[in-house]
Image (cartoon, grey):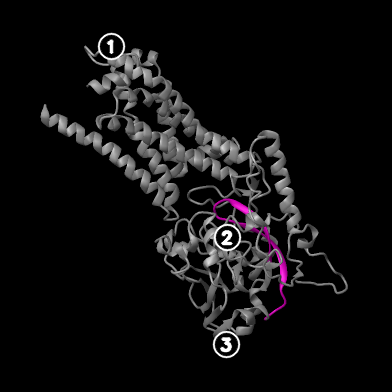
Protein backbone atom coordinates (compact mmCIF):
# COMPACT_ATOMS: atom_id res chain seq x y z
CA UNK A 1 0.00 0.00 0.00
CA UNK A 2 1.07 3.51 -0.78
CA UNK A 3 4.48 2.66 -2.07
CA UNK A 4 6.40 5.75 -3.02
CA UNK A 5 9.73 5.24 -4.68
CA UNK A 6 12.12 7.96 -3.67
CA UNK A 7 14.07 9.59 -6.45
CA UNK A 8 11.19 9.07 -8.82
CA UNK A 9 9.33 12.26 -9.58
CA UNK A 10 6.15 11.42 -11.41
CA UNK A 11 4.53 14.30 -13.17
CA UNK A 12 1.37 15.51 -11.50
CA UNK A 13 -1.56 14.74 -13.75
CA UNK A 14 -2.64 18.35 -13.50
CA UNK A 15 0.71 19.38 -14.95
CA UNK A 16 0.30 17.41 -18.14
CA UNK A 17 -2.29 19.72 -19.65
CA UNK A 18 -2.66 23.04 -17.90
CA UNK A 19 -6.24 23.82 -17.13
CA UNK A 20 -6.21 26.96 -19.24
CA UNK A 21 -5.10 25.05 -22.30
CA UNK A 22 -7.74 22.37 -22.33
CA UNK A 23 -10.43 24.85 -21.43
CA UNK A 24 -9.38 26.85 -24.40
CA UNK A 25 -9.25 23.75 -26.55
CA UNK A 26 -12.88 23.12 -25.74
CA UNK A 27 -13.78 26.67 -26.63
CA UNK A 28 -11.90 26.37 -29.89
CA UNK A 29 -13.79 23.21 -30.81
CA UNK A 30 -17.08 24.84 -29.92
CA UNK A 31 -16.26 28.02 -31.75
CA UNK A 32 -15.31 26.01 -34.81
CA UNK A 33 -18.55 24.04 -34.64
CA UNK A 34 -20.53 27.20 -34.14
CA UNK A 35 -18.73 28.90 -37.00
CA UNK A 36 -19.38 25.98 -39.31
CA UNK A 37 -23.00 25.47 -38.44
CA UNK A 38 -24.18 28.90 -37.52
CA UNK A 39 -22.03 31.62 -39.02
CA UNK A 40 -24.08 34.47 -37.58
CA UNK A 41 -24.09 33.48 -33.91
CA UNK A 42 -21.31 34.80 -31.74
CA UNK A 43 -19.50 32.42 -29.42
CA UNK A 44 -21.91 32.09 -26.51
CA UNK A 45 -19.34 31.45 -23.87
CA UNK A 46 -16.77 33.99 -24.99
CA UNK A 47 -18.02 36.51 -22.45
CA UNK A 48 -17.73 34.05 -19.59
CA UNK A 49 -15.04 35.15 -17.18
CA UNK A 50 -12.37 32.62 -16.38
CA UNK A 51 -12.38 31.05 -12.93
CA UNK A 52 -11.11 33.36 -10.25
CA UNK A 53 -7.56 32.57 -9.37
CA UNK A 54 -7.70 30.41 -6.27
CA UNK A 55 -4.86 29.78 -3.85
CA UNK A 56 -2.77 26.85 -4.97
CA UNK A 57 -2.28 23.80 -2.78
CA UNK A 58 1.04 22.03 -2.81
CA UNK A 59 0.27 18.38 -3.35
CA UNK A 60 2.29 15.35 -4.31
CA UNK A 61 0.97 12.75 -6.72
CA UNK A 62 -0.59 9.60 -5.35
CA UNK A 63 -0.41 6.02 -6.60
CA UNK A 64 -4.12 5.81 -5.83
CA UNK A 65 -4.85 8.12 -8.77
CA UNK A 66 -6.41 6.69 -11.90
CA UNK A 67 -5.19 7.38 -15.38
CA UNK A 68 -8.30 8.61 -17.16
CA UNK A 69 -9.03 11.92 -18.87
CA UNK A 70 -10.10 14.43 -16.28
CA UNK A 71 -13.41 16.21 -16.47
CA UNK A 72 -12.92 19.85 -17.50
CA UNK A 73 -12.67 22.30 -14.63
CA UNK A 74 -15.70 24.26 -15.80
CA UNK A 75 -17.88 21.15 -15.58
CA UNK A 76 -16.48 20.01 -12.24
CA UNK A 77 -17.21 23.44 -10.81
CA UNK A 78 -20.36 24.29 -12.78
CA UNK A 79 -22.43 21.11 -12.60
CA UNK A 80 -23.01 20.30 -8.95
CA UNK A 81 -25.47 18.85 -6.51
CA UNK A 82 -25.26 20.93 -3.34
CA UNK A 83 -28.88 21.28 -2.33
CA UNK A 84 -28.10 23.80 0.41
CA UNK A 85 -27.65 26.23 -2.49
CA UNK A 86 -30.60 25.03 -4.57
CA UNK A 87 -31.61 21.94 -6.51
CA UNK A 88 -30.52 23.11 -9.97
CA UNK A 89 -27.15 21.88 -11.17
CA UNK A 90 -26.04 25.48 -11.70
CA UNK A 91 -27.43 26.80 -8.41
CA UNK A 92 -24.34 25.95 -6.32
CA UNK A 93 -22.01 27.82 -8.70
CA UNK A 94 -24.44 30.76 -8.71
CA UNK A 95 -25.01 31.02 -4.97
CA UNK A 96 -22.09 29.41 -3.15
CA UNK A 97 -20.01 32.58 -3.21
CA UNK A 98 -22.03 33.56 -0.14
CA UNK A 99 -20.47 30.76 1.86
CA UNK A 100 -17.84 31.99 4.31
CA UNK A 101 -15.02 29.50 4.49
CA UNK A 102 -12.87 31.37 7.00
CA UNK A 103 -12.87 31.10 9.94
CA UNK A 104 -13.84 27.43 9.77
CA UNK A 105 -13.49 24.60 12.18
CA UNK A 106 -14.54 20.98 12.40
CA UNK A 107 -15.87 19.50 15.63
CA UNK A 108 -14.56 16.05 16.40
CA UNK A 109 -17.07 14.45 18.74
CA UNK A 110 -18.26 11.19 20.22
CA UNK A 111 -16.30 8.08 21.02
CA UNK A 112 -12.75 9.40 20.66
CA UNK A 113 -9.93 9.96 23.12
CA UNK A 114 -9.17 13.39 21.66
CA UNK A 115 -12.37 15.21 20.86
CA UNK A 116 -12.19 18.90 20.12
CA UNK A 117 -12.61 21.70 17.67
CA UNK A 118 -10.08 21.51 14.87
CA UNK A 119 -9.32 24.68 12.98
CA UNK A 120 -9.18 24.40 9.18
CA UNK A 121 -5.54 25.58 9.10
CA UNK A 122 -4.62 22.89 11.57
CA UNK A 123 -6.42 20.26 9.49
CA UNK A 124 -4.65 21.43 6.34
CA UNK A 125 -1.27 20.98 8.02
CA UNK A 126 -2.11 17.69 9.68
CA UNK A 127 -0.70 15.46 6.94
CA UNK A 128 0.99 15.93 3.56
CA UNK A 129 -1.48 16.78 0.80
CA UNK A 130 -1.78 14.46 -2.15
CA UNK A 131 -3.40 14.81 -5.53
CA UNK A 132 -5.87 11.95 -5.99
CA UNK A 133 -7.50 11.59 -9.37
CA UNK A 134 -10.71 9.69 -8.66
CA UNK A 135 -13.78 8.68 -10.57
CA UNK A 136 -16.93 10.28 -9.17
CA UNK A 137 -20.20 8.50 -9.92
CA UNK A 138 -23.38 10.32 -9.09
CA UNK A 139 -26.41 8.25 -8.14
CA UNK A 140 -28.25 10.08 -10.93
CA UNK A 141 -26.26 8.26 -13.60
CA UNK A 142 -23.47 10.62 -14.57
CA UNK A 143 -19.80 10.59 -13.70
CA UNK A 144 -16.68 12.70 -13.68
CA UNK A 145 -12.96 12.24 -13.14
CA UNK A 146 -11.71 14.78 -10.62
CA UNK A 147 -8.20 15.53 -9.37
CA UNK A 148 -8.89 16.08 -5.70
CA UNK A 149 -6.36 17.37 -3.20
CA UNK A 150 -6.30 16.06 0.34
CA UNK A 151 -5.12 13.18 2.48
CA UNK A 152 -6.62 9.93 3.67
CA UNK A 153 -9.26 10.52 6.31
CA UNK A 154 -7.51 7.77 8.30
CA UNK A 155 -4.70 10.26 9.02
CA UNK A 156 -7.13 12.36 11.02
CA UNK A 157 -8.97 9.41 12.55
CA UNK A 158 -5.76 7.88 13.89
CA UNK A 159 -4.75 11.15 15.52
CA UNK A 160 -8.03 11.58 17.39
CA UNK A 161 -7.87 7.98 18.70
CA UNK A 162 -11.30 6.37 18.32
CA UNK A 163 -12.52 4.33 21.29
CA UNK A 164 -13.47 0.67 21.06
CA UNK A 165 -17.16 1.41 20.64
CA UNK A 166 -16.64 3.74 17.66
CA UNK A 167 -18.05 1.51 14.93
CA UNK A 168 -19.21 4.25 12.56
CA UNK A 169 -18.55 7.87 11.80
CA UNK A 170 -21.09 10.44 10.78
CA UNK A 171 -20.18 13.76 9.26
CA UNK A 172 -22.26 16.85 8.98
CA UNK A 173 -22.46 19.65 6.42
CA UNK A 174 -22.84 23.26 7.44
CA UNK A 175 -26.47 24.40 7.66
CA UNK A 176 -26.44 28.18 7.57
CA UNK A 177 -29.89 29.39 6.61
CA UNK A 178 -28.65 32.93 6.04
CA UNK A 179 -26.08 31.99 3.45
CA UNK A 180 -27.59 28.81 2.05
CA UNK A 181 -30.88 29.64 0.30
CA UNK A 182 -31.66 25.97 -0.38
CA UNK A 183 -32.13 25.24 3.30
CA UNK A 184 -35.51 26.96 3.22
CA UNK A 185 -36.77 24.13 1.00
CA UNK A 186 -38.00 21.12 2.98
CA UNK A 187 -36.16 18.68 0.73
CA UNK A 188 -34.01 17.12 3.42
CA UNK A 189 -33.78 17.31 7.18
CA UNK A 190 -30.94 19.81 7.45
CA UNK A 191 -28.12 19.69 8.37
CA UNK A 192 -26.98 17.15 5.80
CA UNK A 193 -25.55 14.09 7.49
CA UNK A 194 -23.68 11.21 5.91
CA UNK A 195 -21.75 8.35 7.43
CA UNK A 196 -19.41 5.43 6.97
CA UNK A 197 -18.60 2.21 8.74
CA UNK A 198 -15.29 2.57 10.57
CA UNK A 199 -13.40 0.26 8.19
CA UNK A 200 -14.72 2.29 5.25
CA UNK A 201 -13.69 5.53 6.93
CA UNK A 202 -10.22 4.10 7.59
CA UNK A 203 -9.75 2.89 4.03
CA UNK A 204 -6.88 4.75 2.35
CA UNK A 205 -9.10 5.74 -0.60
CA UNK A 206 -11.42 7.71 1.69
CA UNK A 207 -10.23 11.26 1.39
CA UNK A 208 -10.41 14.31 3.59
CA UNK A 209 -10.42 16.79 0.75
CA UNK A 210 -9.39 20.44 0.61
CA UNK A 211 -8.91 21.14 -3.07
CA UNK A 212 -9.26 20.19 -6.70
CA UNK A 213 -7.18 20.87 -9.77
CA UNK A 214 -4.28 21.92 -7.54
CA UNK A 215 -6.22 24.75 -5.90
CA UNK A 216 -8.37 25.15 -2.81
CA UNK A 217 -11.91 23.86 -3.28
CA UNK A 218 -14.34 26.24 -4.94
CA UNK A 219 -17.27 26.84 -2.58
CA UNK A 220 -19.72 24.94 -4.77
CA UNK A 221 -17.53 21.85 -4.50
CA UNK A 222 -17.63 21.83 -0.72
CA UNK A 223 -15.06 24.34 0.52
CA UNK A 224 -13.17 24.43 2.72
CA UNK A 225 -13.17 20.74 3.59
CA UNK A 226 -15.19 17.73 2.48
CA UNK A 227 -15.17 13.97 2.37
CA UNK A 228 -14.62 12.00 -0.84
CA UNK A 229 -15.47 8.30 -0.99
CA UNK A 230 -14.83 7.29 -4.61
CA UNK A 231 -16.44 3.84 -4.62
CA UNK A 232 -19.78 5.13 -3.35
CA UNK A 233 -22.40 7.29 -5.02
CA UNK A 234 -21.49 10.96 -4.86
CA UNK A 235 -23.99 11.92 -2.17
CA UNK A 236 -21.93 9.99 0.39
CA UNK A 237 -19.13 12.51 -0.21
CA UNK A 238 -20.51 15.32 1.95
CA UNK A 239 -19.38 18.88 1.35
CA UNK A 240 -18.38 21.75 3.64
CA UNK A 241 -18.27 19.62 6.75
CA UNK A 242 -18.41 21.10 10.24
CA UNK A 243 -18.45 17.96 12.41
CA UNK A 244 -17.28 14.36 12.44
CA UNK A 245 -18.85 12.16 15.11
CA UNK A 246 -17.68 8.74 16.17
CA UNK A 247 -20.68 6.61 17.04
CA UNK A 248 -21.58 3.07 17.98
CA UNK A 249 -24.69 2.58 15.84
CA UNK A 250 -25.19 2.98 12.12
CA UNK A 251 -26.03 6.66 11.63
CA UNK A 252 -29.29 7.82 10.09
CA UNK A 253 -28.15 9.61 6.97
CA UNK A 254 -30.03 12.39 5.20
CA UNK A 255 -30.99 10.75 1.91
CA UNK A 256 -31.77 7.49 3.60
CA UNK A 257 -34.19 9.28 5.92
CA UNK A 258 -35.77 11.14 3.00
CA UNK A 259 -36.24 8.10 0.74
CA UNK A 260 -35.13 4.84 2.38
CA UNK A 261 -36.07 2.72 -0.63
CA UNK A 262 -33.97 4.80 -2.96
CA UNK A 263 -30.87 5.60 -0.95
CA UNK A 264 -29.27 3.04 1.33
CA UNK A 265 -26.68 3.62 3.99
CA UNK A 266 -23.97 1.84 2.00
CA UNK A 267 -24.77 3.23 -1.46
CA UNK A 268 -21.80 1.52 -3.03
CA UNK A 269 -21.64 2.02 -6.77
CA UNK A 270 -23.17 -1.18 -8.11
CA UNK A 271 -24.29 -1.64 -11.72
CA UNK A 272 -26.35 -4.68 -10.77
CA UNK A 273 -28.55 -3.02 -8.19
CA UNK A 274 -30.94 -0.58 -9.82
CA UNK A 275 -32.21 2.56 -8.25
CA UNK A 276 -36.02 2.26 -8.04
CA UNK A 277 -36.38 4.93 -10.72
CA UNK A 278 -33.56 4.04 -13.08
CA UNK A 279 -30.96 1.44 -13.88
CA UNK A 280 -27.46 1.96 -12.55
CA UNK A 281 -25.86 -0.23 -15.23
CA UNK A 282 -24.57 2.66 -17.31
CA UNK A 283 -23.42 6.22 -16.86
CA UNK A 284 -22.65 9.31 -18.87
CA UNK A 285 -19.19 10.83 -18.43
CA UNK A 286 -19.64 14.56 -18.16
CA UNK A 287 -17.60 16.72 -20.51
CA UNK A 288 -16.07 13.78 -22.33
CA UNK A 289 -18.93 11.85 -23.87
CA UNK A 290 -20.51 13.60 -26.83
CA UNK A 291 -24.20 14.18 -27.29
CA UNK A 292 -24.57 11.08 -29.44
CA UNK A 293 -22.14 8.90 -27.50
CA UNK A 294 -23.46 5.69 -26.04
CA UNK A 295 -23.38 5.65 -22.25
CA UNK A 296 -20.52 3.68 -20.72
CA UNK A 297 -20.90 0.70 -18.44
CA UNK A 298 -20.74 1.45 -14.74
CA UNK A 299 -18.04 -0.51 -12.95
CA UNK A 300 -18.56 -2.43 -9.72
CA UNK A 301 -17.54 -0.22 -6.80
CA UNK A 302 -16.94 2.46 -9.44
CA UNK A 303 -13.84 0.60 -10.61
CA UNK A 304 -12.34 0.32 -7.13
CA UNK A 305 -13.39 -3.30 -6.56
CA UNK A 306 -9.80 -4.51 -6.20
CA UNK A 307 -9.27 -2.15 -3.29
CA UNK A 308 -12.62 -2.25 -1.50
CA UNK A 309 -14.57 -5.41 -2.40
CA UNK A 310 -13.04 -7.22 0.58
CA UNK A 311 -14.78 -4.77 2.93
CA UNK A 312 -18.09 -6.30 1.89
CA UNK A 313 -17.14 -9.98 1.70
CA UNK A 314 -20.16 -12.13 2.49
CA UNK A 315 -22.59 -9.21 2.47
CA UNK A 316 -25.71 -9.31 0.34
CA UNK A 317 -25.21 -6.10 -1.62
CA UNK A 318 -28.80 -6.17 -2.85
CA UNK A 319 -30.04 -6.01 0.69
CA UNK A 320 -27.38 -3.57 1.87
CA UNK A 321 -27.68 -1.22 -1.11
CA UNK B 1 -72.98 22.33 -27.97
CA UNK B 2 -71.91 25.17 -30.20
CA UNK B 3 -68.35 25.05 -28.98
CA UNK B 4 -68.20 21.34 -29.67
CA UNK B 5 -69.41 21.83 -33.19
CA UNK B 6 -66.68 24.34 -33.82
CA UNK B 7 -64.06 21.97 -32.61
CA UNK B 8 -64.72 19.82 -35.63
CA UNK B 9 -62.76 21.26 -38.43
CA UNK B 10 -64.59 21.86 -41.60
CA UNK B 11 -68.03 22.24 -40.15
CA UNK B 12 -70.02 25.42 -40.39
CA UNK B 13 -69.52 27.74 -37.44
CA UNK B 14 -73.07 27.89 -36.18
CA UNK B 15 -76.49 27.36 -37.61
CA UNK B 16 -77.47 30.54 -39.33
CA UNK B 17 -74.11 32.15 -38.49
CA UNK B 18 -73.34 35.26 -40.47
CA UNK B 19 -71.04 34.52 -43.37
CA UNK B 20 -69.40 37.90 -42.95
CA UNK B 21 -68.47 37.19 -39.35
CA UNK B 22 -66.98 33.91 -40.36
CA UNK B 23 -64.93 35.42 -43.10
CA UNK B 24 -63.66 38.13 -40.78
CA UNK B 25 -62.59 35.55 -38.24
CA UNK B 26 -60.72 33.68 -40.95
CA UNK B 27 -58.98 36.82 -42.10
CA UNK B 28 -56.95 36.91 -38.97
CA UNK B 29 -56.86 33.18 -38.42
CA UNK B 30 -54.42 32.52 -41.24
CA UNK B 31 -51.63 34.81 -39.98
CA UNK B 32 -52.31 33.83 -36.36
CA UNK B 33 -52.05 30.19 -37.29
CA UNK B 34 -48.78 30.80 -39.07
CA UNK B 35 -47.48 32.78 -36.11
CA UNK B 36 -48.46 30.04 -33.64
CA UNK B 37 -46.88 27.43 -35.89
CA UNK B 38 -43.57 29.30 -35.99
CA UNK B 39 -43.67 30.22 -32.30
CA UNK B 40 -44.25 26.58 -31.40
CA UNK B 41 -41.03 25.64 -33.18
CA UNK B 42 -38.99 28.11 -31.13
CA UNK B 43 -38.35 25.73 -28.19
CA UNK B 44 -36.78 23.29 -30.64
CA UNK B 45 -34.82 26.03 -32.43
CA UNK B 46 -33.52 27.21 -29.07
CA UNK B 47 -32.18 23.75 -28.28
CA UNK B 48 -30.50 23.50 -31.69
CA UNK B 49 -28.88 26.92 -31.30
CA UNK B 50 -27.76 26.14 -27.75
CA UNK B 51 -26.38 22.82 -28.97
CA UNK B 52 -24.32 24.50 -31.66
CA UNK B 53 -22.95 27.17 -29.35
CA UNK B 54 -22.09 24.97 -26.38
CA UNK B 55 -24.96 26.33 -24.33
CA UNK B 56 -26.50 23.06 -23.19
CA UNK B 57 -24.33 22.84 -20.07
CA UNK B 58 -22.35 19.94 -18.69
CA UNK B 59 -25.02 17.32 -19.32
CA UNK B 60 -26.51 18.19 -22.71
CA UNK B 61 -28.57 15.02 -23.13
CA UNK B 62 -30.29 15.55 -19.80
CA UNK B 63 -30.86 19.21 -20.60
CA UNK B 64 -32.46 18.48 -23.97
CA UNK B 65 -34.53 15.54 -22.75
CA UNK B 66 -35.93 17.52 -19.84
CA UNK B 67 -36.56 20.59 -21.94
CA UNK B 68 -38.54 18.53 -24.46
CA UNK B 69 -40.55 16.98 -21.61
CA UNK B 70 -41.32 20.39 -20.17
CA UNK B 71 -42.49 21.72 -23.53
CA UNK B 72 -44.69 18.67 -24.00
CA UNK B 73 -46.48 19.60 -20.77
CA UNK B 74 -46.68 23.24 -21.81
CA UNK B 75 -48.35 22.35 -25.11
CA UNK B 76 -50.72 19.94 -23.39
CA UNK B 77 -51.73 22.72 -21.00
CA UNK B 78 -52.19 25.13 -23.92
CA UNK B 79 -54.34 22.57 -25.70
CA UNK B 80 -56.52 22.19 -22.63
CA UNK B 81 -56.69 25.97 -22.21
CA UNK B 82 -58.31 26.61 -25.58
CA UNK B 83 -61.90 25.79 -24.57
CA UNK B 84 -61.77 27.73 -21.28
CA UNK B 85 -60.29 30.68 -23.18
CA UNK B 86 -63.25 30.51 -25.49
CA UNK B 87 -65.69 30.45 -22.62
CA UNK B 88 -63.97 33.50 -21.22
CA UNK B 89 -64.72 35.41 -24.39
CA UNK B 90 -61.90 34.65 -26.81
CA UNK B 91 -62.99 34.56 -30.46
CA UNK B 92 -64.57 31.22 -31.36
CA UNK B 93 -62.04 30.66 -34.12
CA UNK B 94 -59.21 30.07 -31.63
CA UNK B 95 -60.63 26.60 -31.30
CA UNK B 96 -59.13 25.97 -34.69
CA UNK B 97 -55.63 26.42 -33.23
CA UNK B 98 -56.19 23.52 -30.88
CA UNK B 99 -55.30 20.75 -33.27
CA UNK B 100 -51.94 22.35 -33.99
CA UNK B 101 -51.20 22.82 -30.31
CA UNK B 102 -52.14 19.20 -29.63
CA UNK B 103 -49.96 17.98 -32.46
CA UNK B 104 -47.05 20.02 -31.13
CA UNK B 105 -47.54 18.36 -27.75
CA UNK B 106 -47.30 15.02 -29.55
CA UNK B 107 -44.27 16.24 -31.50
CA UNK B 108 -42.34 17.32 -28.40
CA UNK B 109 -43.51 14.28 -26.44
CA UNK B 110 -42.31 11.99 -29.21
CA UNK B 111 -38.89 13.69 -29.36
CA UNK B 112 -38.67 13.40 -25.57
CA UNK B 113 -39.45 9.68 -25.78
CA UNK B 114 -37.11 9.18 -28.75
CA UNK B 115 -34.21 10.77 -26.89
CA UNK B 116 -34.82 8.46 -23.94
CA UNK B 117 -34.92 5.37 -26.18
CA UNK B 118 -31.94 6.46 -28.20
CA UNK B 119 -29.47 8.37 -26.05
CA UNK B 120 -30.44 6.99 -22.65
CA UNK B 121 -31.18 3.37 -23.50
CA UNK B 122 -29.37 3.10 -26.85
CA UNK B 123 -32.24 1.08 -28.39
CA UNK B 124 -31.90 -1.62 -25.80
CA UNK B 125 -35.54 -2.64 -26.12
CA UNK B 126 -35.40 -5.08 -23.24
CA UNK B 127 -34.10 -2.35 -20.95
CA UNK B 128 -36.79 0.02 -22.23
CA UNK B 129 -39.49 -2.60 -21.62
CA UNK B 130 -38.11 -3.30 -18.14
CA UNK B 131 -38.05 0.43 -17.38
CA UNK B 132 -41.66 0.84 -18.49
CA UNK B 133 -42.77 -2.18 -16.49
CA UNK B 134 -40.81 -1.56 -13.31
CA UNK B 135 -40.51 2.18 -12.87
CA UNK B 136 -43.79 3.91 -12.16
CA UNK B 137 -42.64 7.32 -13.40
CA UNK B 138 -41.65 5.83 -16.74
CA UNK B 139 -44.87 3.78 -16.85
CA UNK B 140 -46.87 6.98 -16.43
CA UNK B 141 -44.87 8.88 -19.03
CA UNK B 142 -45.08 6.05 -21.54
CA UNK B 143 -48.83 5.67 -20.99
CA UNK B 144 -49.32 9.39 -21.54
CA UNK B 145 -47.36 9.26 -24.80
CA UNK B 146 -49.15 6.09 -25.94
CA UNK B 147 -52.54 7.72 -25.38
CA UNK B 148 -51.45 10.66 -27.52
CA UNK B 149 -50.80 8.37 -30.51
CA UNK B 150 -54.44 7.65 -31.46
CA UNK B 151 -55.33 11.30 -30.92
CA UNK B 152 -52.56 12.40 -33.25
CA UNK B 153 -53.51 9.81 -35.87
CA UNK B 154 -57.17 10.87 -35.83
CA UNK B 155 -56.49 14.59 -35.89
CA UNK B 156 -57.56 14.99 -39.49
CA UNK B 157 -60.81 15.70 -41.28
CA UNK B 158 -61.06 12.23 -42.69
CA UNK B 159 -60.90 10.59 -39.26
CA UNK B 160 -63.30 13.13 -37.80
CA UNK B 161 -65.87 12.37 -40.49
CA UNK B 162 -65.28 8.67 -40.34
CA UNK B 163 -65.50 8.35 -36.58
CA UNK B 164 -68.43 10.70 -36.09
CA UNK B 165 -69.46 10.90 -32.46
CA UNK B 166 -66.86 8.32 -31.50
CA UNK B 167 -64.17 10.86 -32.40
CA UNK B 168 -65.36 13.08 -29.56
CA UNK B 169 -65.28 10.21 -27.10
CA UNK B 170 -61.85 9.11 -28.26
CA UNK B 171 -60.43 12.58 -27.84
CA UNK B 172 -61.63 12.73 -24.24
CA UNK B 173 -58.55 10.60 -23.60
CA UNK B 174 -56.78 13.92 -23.30
CA UNK B 175 -58.34 14.31 -19.84
CA UNK B 176 -56.56 11.13 -18.80
CA UNK B 177 -53.26 11.56 -20.58
CA UNK B 178 -52.48 15.07 -19.38
CA UNK B 179 -52.73 14.11 -15.68
CA UNK B 180 -50.56 11.08 -16.50
CA UNK B 181 -47.96 13.40 -17.98
CA UNK B 182 -48.00 15.54 -14.85
CA UNK B 183 -47.77 12.39 -12.72
CA UNK B 184 -44.72 11.32 -14.76
CA UNK B 185 -43.02 14.63 -13.95
CA UNK B 186 -44.16 14.53 -10.33
CA UNK B 187 -42.86 11.03 -9.65
CA UNK B 188 -39.62 11.85 -11.42
CA UNK B 189 -39.01 14.66 -8.97
CA UNK B 190 -40.63 13.08 -5.91
CA UNK B 191 -37.65 10.93 -4.96
CA UNK B 192 -35.75 14.08 -4.19
CA UNK B 193 -38.74 15.84 -2.65
CA UNK B 194 -38.29 18.47 -5.31
CA UNK B 195 -41.89 18.90 -6.40
CA UNK B 196 -42.06 22.68 -6.80
CA UNK B 197 -42.14 22.64 -10.60
CA UNK B 198 -44.44 19.62 -11.07
CA UNK B 199 -46.80 21.22 -8.53
CA UNK B 200 -47.17 24.24 -10.81
CA UNK B 201 -48.21 22.03 -13.74
CA UNK B 202 -50.49 19.99 -11.49
CA UNK B 203 -52.22 23.16 -10.33
CA UNK B 204 -52.67 24.48 -13.87
CA UNK B 205 -54.06 21.17 -15.12
CA UNK B 206 -56.31 20.88 -12.07
CA UNK B 207 -57.78 24.32 -12.79
CA UNK B 208 -58.23 23.53 -16.50
CA UNK B 209 -60.07 20.32 -15.66
CA UNK B 210 -62.04 21.85 -12.79
CA UNK B 211 -63.52 24.60 -14.97
CA UNK B 212 -64.88 21.89 -17.26
CA UNK B 213 -66.53 20.07 -14.39
CA UNK B 214 -67.99 23.30 -12.98
CA UNK B 215 -69.32 24.24 -16.41
CA UNK B 216 -70.99 20.87 -16.77
CA UNK B 217 -72.61 21.13 -13.36
CA UNK B 218 -73.86 24.62 -14.10
CA UNK B 219 -75.20 23.52 -17.49
CA UNK B 220 -76.93 20.50 -15.92
CA UNK B 221 -78.65 22.72 -13.36
CA UNK B 222 -79.86 25.10 -16.01
CA UNK B 223 -81.28 22.34 -18.11
Which region is colored magenta?
Answer: A126-148
Q: Is residue B82 above or below residue A163?
A: above
Name the subunit of mark 2: A
Q: Residues within 10 Å of mark 2 (few under 14, many from 20)?
A: many
Whether pointer 3 and pointer 1 mark residues with C-beta atoms closer than 8 Å, the reply is: no
How far across and down, in percent of the image, does residue A274 sit?
A: 53, 50
Q: Position of residue A134 (x, y in %)?
A: 68, 61
Image height of A135 relative to A61, above or below:
above
Q: Which residue lies under the disc numbered 2?
A: A234
Q: Earlier in the sequence, mark 3 or mark 2?
A: 3
Residue A169 part of the magenta segment: no
Label 3 secondary element: loop
Label 3 CA crowd tier, 10 Å (few <14, some 14–19, many 20+): some
Residue under numbered circle 3 = A114
Residue on which disc 1 sits: B19
SS label for mark 2: helix
User: Residue B152 appears in which quarter of the rendering?
Assistant: top left
- Mostly what secondary structure, the magenta segment? strand
Badge 1 element: helix
Reply above or below: A20 against A153: above
Left/right of residue B12 with respect to residue A255 in the rendered view: left
Amino acid sequence: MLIRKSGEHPILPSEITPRAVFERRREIVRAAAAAALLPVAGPARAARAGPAARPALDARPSPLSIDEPRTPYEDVTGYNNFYEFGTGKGDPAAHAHRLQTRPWSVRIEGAVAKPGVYDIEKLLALAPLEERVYRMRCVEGWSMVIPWVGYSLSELIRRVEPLGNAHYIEYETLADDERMPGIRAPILAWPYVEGLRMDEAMHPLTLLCFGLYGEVLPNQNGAPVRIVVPWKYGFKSAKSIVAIRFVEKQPMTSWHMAAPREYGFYSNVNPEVAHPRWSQATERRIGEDGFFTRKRKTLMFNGYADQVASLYAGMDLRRYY
Amino acid sequence: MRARGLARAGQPAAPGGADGARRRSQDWLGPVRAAVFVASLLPLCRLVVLGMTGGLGANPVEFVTRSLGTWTLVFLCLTLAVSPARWLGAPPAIVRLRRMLGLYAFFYGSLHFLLYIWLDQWFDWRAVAADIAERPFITAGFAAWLLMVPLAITSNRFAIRRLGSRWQRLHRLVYLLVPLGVLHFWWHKAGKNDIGEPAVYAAIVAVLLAVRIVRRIVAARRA
